[in-house]
Amino acid sequence: MIKPFESLFDIYAVYIQHPVISKWLTIALCVSLFLNTYLFNVAKQQPKIVVQKVIEKVQVPVQVPVAKKERKMSSSTPSVAKAIKKSHQHHHHHQQQQHHHSDIVRPLDEVFSLIGTPEVLTDEEIISVVQSGKMAAYALEKVLGDFERAVHIRRALVSRDSITKSLEGSLLPVKNYHYDKVMGACCENVIGYMPIPVGVAGPLNIDGDLIHIPMATTEGCLVASAARGCKAINAGGGATTIVTADGMTRGPCVEFPNILRAADCKRWIEQEGEKVVTEAFNSTSRFARVRKLKVALAGRLMYIRFSTTTGDAMGMNMISKGCEKALSKISERYPDMQIISLSGNYCTDKKPAAINWIEGRGKSVVAEAVIPGAVVEKVLKTTVAALVELNISKNLVGSAMAGSVGGFNAHAANILTAIYLATGQDPAQNVESSNCITLMKAVNNDKDLNISCTMPCIEVGTIGGGTILPPQQAMLDFLGVRGPHPTEPGANARRLARIICASVMAGELSLCAALAAGHLVQAHMAHNRNTASAAAPATAPSIAASVIQASTPPATPVEKEDPIPGSCIKS
């Protein structure tokens, strides 16, 4: 038994000492070691490969030969190729969603250790991290890097923490929105977006250009009524507009030890200090330029109303920065001055105020049109005299009786806010922006109607804020005023203000005509009610409608004709 081993060792000793054979043995040993290692790794991965092939066979039951597939792809149109690519992307996204919505939740410590790679975590695991207090819900976008997924997870968190528990499965849409534009600019703690219908009125002839008016609203009849006003104004030659002033305002509040110091500072700002304050303010921006300083005292308190141009931006952030710089310059001369608030409500922003009505804020615009008497009767179904009388009694005397400030109109806020929502403006600023006085007068021997709308506080911009969102940008493009004007800063914003004022005039004209003719209730009953779910039998007479018709005198002989297409006012 020992002799065979001895002979084997003798042979090994001979070959291992041989100079050539020993090298070949070493090479053979290395190759063998490498092959064994490779085959071992392949054997480990083989089950995964088999599973993947099974999945592929299940997902794609019909295999197309390579040559045939290439011929098909070469002969297909680019749109087909694009559709195939989109299908693959959708499949990949679907796989990701399945992974994110897995029911398996790992221990919290393990999940938190993987937070740097959120793609390997399920939605429920991330929810558990937030619920444990280890991550703030407002930081989901920053941590995940996937904005839409962050919104989904936040919805779940808010829904489960709410009383109704209804948000998570609600109809508030989430998918396919530009959350990257929203983050850090337009909204925080986003849980979805609110679709609003966008209608179009017009075109309206404004200063010689035919412009369609986009309006985002949920009020039935509003767009149709504005469209009728546009039709009447166009028939008279269109609307003419002018911008009488351009200046966004901010009114800081400061305090002094006594009224003597406050009065001295007021005098200094209004005289030799005006240049110093203006230069300090203007140094903060290429576009912000002080137009006017208005100073007022209330005891030891002093209010400085800065009125400045802001280019094509609405300009509140721009002007606030300039005010801070100007106040720091004033405090160098008056170190005992205490800044109470950067905004002292002397601006005034998003609140009714006589100072805005008198001094103006943003763009001050006037629009005018002359409507021939024949058009008034044919399109508006009333008379010039009736419109003039109604405007005096309602818009002027009625508003005065109510103690209105800037509300001498029928519904300027309706049209303005609808355009604001469509074009990305701040809807809260409709409070002062919709200040408007509507005037009507019979001209040309009392045959025709002159109508004008004066709006001293239209606060708009074509850059910044909600105008960065693609849908709102599309509407600004539609109006031809998107972004900064290339050669004349502020021209696009002023043009948007002109469009709004002319559109308000169209809305005023149509609503006042409906009121003068007694058609308002009829129009809203006919066009502002969804009768699909609860329609009355066709044979049943409408008592309310018959009573209204019986009590309303006809404005013209053709009042009982069918409604005019495109108009919500029943003729």
Image (cartoon, rainbow, N blue to C red):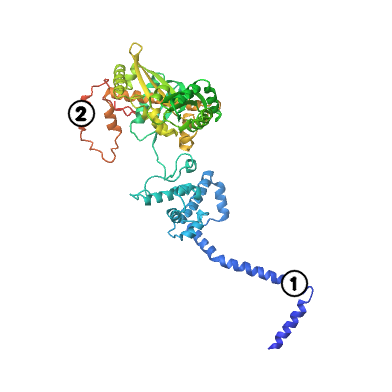
Image mark for residue 24: 1
Task: Please provide percent x and percent y for residue 438.
Answer: 36, 21
Task: Please provide percent x and percent y for residue 244.
Answer: 45, 20
Image mark for residue 149: none
- The quarter of the image holding the N terminus is bottom right
Residue 287 visible in this rendered orientation of the protein? no
Q: Which residue is drawn at 58% across and 54% down?
A: 67
In this view, the residue farthest toward the top is: 445
Secondary structure of the residue carrying numbered label 2:
helix
Task: Please provide percent x and percent y for residue 570.
Answer: 29, 27
Q: Residue at x 55, y 52 (%)?
A: 69
- The quarter of the image holding the C terminus is top left
Secondary structure of the residue carrying numbered label 1:
helix
Q: In this view, does 567 lie to the left or right of 480?
A: left
Image mark for residue 547: 2
Given residues 52 and 141, the one toward you in this image is: 141
Q: Which amino acid does label 1 sit on?
A: Trp
Residue 48 visible in this rendered orientation of the protein? yes
Badge 2 crowding class, 10 Å Cα cut-off, few under 14, some 14 to 19, many 20 or more, is few
Pointer 2 with pointer 1, Cβ within 8 A: no
Badge 1 crowding class, 10 Å Cα cut-off, few under 14, some 14 to 19, many 20 or more, is few
Separation of marks 2 and 1 at Cα, in angstroms? 114 Å
Q: In which quarter of the image is residue 419?
A: top left
Given residues 43 and 334, the one toward you in this image is: 334
Q: Which amino acid does label 2 sit on?
A: Val
Task: Please provide percent x and percent y for residue 517.
Answer: 27, 23
